[in-house]
Image (cartoon, rainbow, N blue to C red):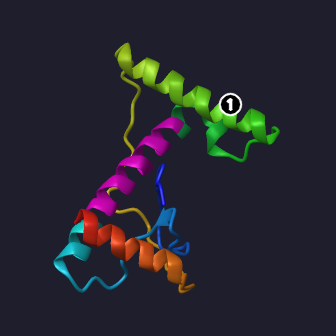
Amino acid sequence: MIIRGLLLGDNGYACRPYFLTSVIYPTTQQEENYNRAHKRTRNLIERVNGLRKRRFPCLHRTLTIKGDTSVAVICATAVLHNIALQYGDNFQHDVDLENVDVYENNENNILGLAFRRQFIIQHF
């Protein structure tokens, strides 16, 4: 299987082969390392999303436009955000999401859990 990318999410969702959640009860050092990396990465993404939502208020609520246009708006705001950063825009970003809320979903997905386990073994 060729992996073109992975999504990270909280445990409010089931772990899937393309959507990795943290290990709820880590039992090995590898799982601890994975959880630490997962948390750091998710926190960074949550902070960036919070900043973009404040910079572009349309992202803070449900977009009321068609799907393709929604994708274009989301991509355009990402590009504009990066351009603003390149030009030194010091937009106030006092987002503090160091400890993102974690939800627990008890739905077991055997393929997702097996994929995550193999991913942890290979990379951590």
Q: Residue at coordinates 45% horizontally, 79% vertically from top-left?
A: 113
Q: Residue at coordinates 48% horizontally, 26% vertically from top-left?
A: 81
Q: How busy is the neighbourhood of tag 1: few (under 14 within 10 Å), some, or many (20 plus)?
A: few
* Drawn side of residue 116 relative to residue 66, left or right: left
User: Which structural element holds mark 1?
Assistant: helix
Q: Residue furthest left?
A: 29
Q: Amino acid at mark 1?
A: Ala
Please provide percent x and percent y for residue 58.
67, 36
> Is 28 a magenta residue?
no
Instruction: Indicate the quadrant where residue 116 lies.
Output: bottom left
Q: Residue at coordinates 68% horizontally, 37% vertically from top-left?
A: 71
Please provide percent x and percent y for residue 111.
52, 78
107 relative to 84, above or below: below
Magenta: predominant secondary structure element? Answer: helix
Please provide percent x and percent y for residue 51.
46, 38
Q: Residue at coordinates 32% horizontally, 57% vertically from top-left?
A: 98
Please provide percent x and percent y for residue 6.
46, 55
Observer-nearest residue: 33 or 1? 1
Q: How many discs appear?
A: 1
96 relative to 1, above or below: above
Instruction: Indicate the quadrant where residue 63 lies.
Output: top right
* Drawn side of residue 56 relative to residue 36, left or right: right
Which residue range is magenta in the image?
37-52
Instruction: Indicate the quadrant where residue 59 lies.
Output: top right
Q: Which residue is mark 1?
A: 72
> Is 38 a magenta residue?
yes
